[in-house]
Amino acid sequence: MIKKRTRQERRLAVHKRIRKRIRGTAERPRLAVFRSLRHIYAQIIDDERGITLAAASTLDRALRQNGRPRYGGNVAAAREVGKLIAARALEKGITRVVFDRGGYRYHGA
């Protein structure tokens, strides 16, 4: 029986194919981005040691408004998460990364 795969299943299959080719190192760690319907998450990962070096999301305390997380599923929120993860990466001395699009289409700068 032919079964139609869901959008999530297709994205995960593409993500597996991408991860076969992309590896983060200590000199150039991997920047992984995950988008849910409400929030955006970014991590800088050293795959050799298997640790997260820096992380940011729209749920982060630095991006909260009046103690509550704002809606994070828009371009403005993504821009703020990008600025925050970049600042945290620079604090750790990370200037270059490998971008892991996580199965999503790349459509930005």
Image (cartoon, rainbow, N blue to C red):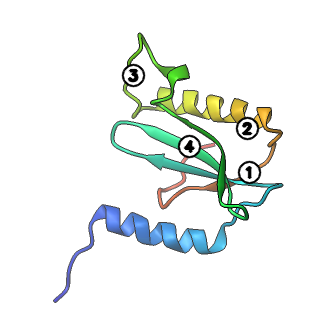
Snapshot quadrant of residue 24: bottom right
Q: Earlier in the sequence, mark 4 or mark 3?
A: 4
2 or 1: mark nearer the eye: 2
Amino acid at circle 2? Ala
SS at mark 1 in the image: loop
Instruction: Quadrant for the N terminus, please.
Output: bottom left
Query: Alpha-carbon distance for marks 4 and 2?
Result: 11 Å
Labels 1 & 4 near each other (Cβ < 8 A)? no
Query: Alpha-carbon distance for marks 2 and 3?
Result: 23 Å
SS at mark 4 in the image: strand
Query: Alpha-carbon distance for marks 1 and 3?
Result: 28 Å
Q: Name the residue under label 3.
A: 70
Structural crowding at the residue carrying mark 1, measured as other residues with C-alpha within 10 Å and reported as few (<14), some (14–19) or many (≥20): some
Labels 4 & 2 near each other (Cβ < 8 A)? no
Amino acid at circle 3? Arg
Q: Is residue 39 left or right of residue 25?
A: left
Structural crowding at the residue carrying mark 3, measured as other residues with C-alpha within 10 Å and reported as few (<14), some (14–19) or many (≥20): some
SS at mark 2 in the image: helix
Please state which of residues 2 and 61 is positioned toward the viewer in this rendering: 61
Q: As drawn, which residue projects farthest toward the left?
A: 1
Compared to residue 12, the image places residue 84 above or below, namely: above
Q: As drawn, which residue projects farthest toward the top?
A: 66
Query: Alpha-carbon distance for marks 4 and 3?
Result: 17 Å
Q: Mark 2 points at which residue?
A: 89
Residue at 46% in and 19% down: 64
Residue at 39% in and 34% down: 73
Residue 33 point in image, percent of width and height: 54, 48
* Label placed on residue 97: 1
Query: Alpha-carbon distance for marks 1 and 4?
Result: 12 Å
Amino acid at circle 1? Val
Q: Name the residue under label 4.
A: 42
Residue 70 point in image, percent of width and height: 39, 22
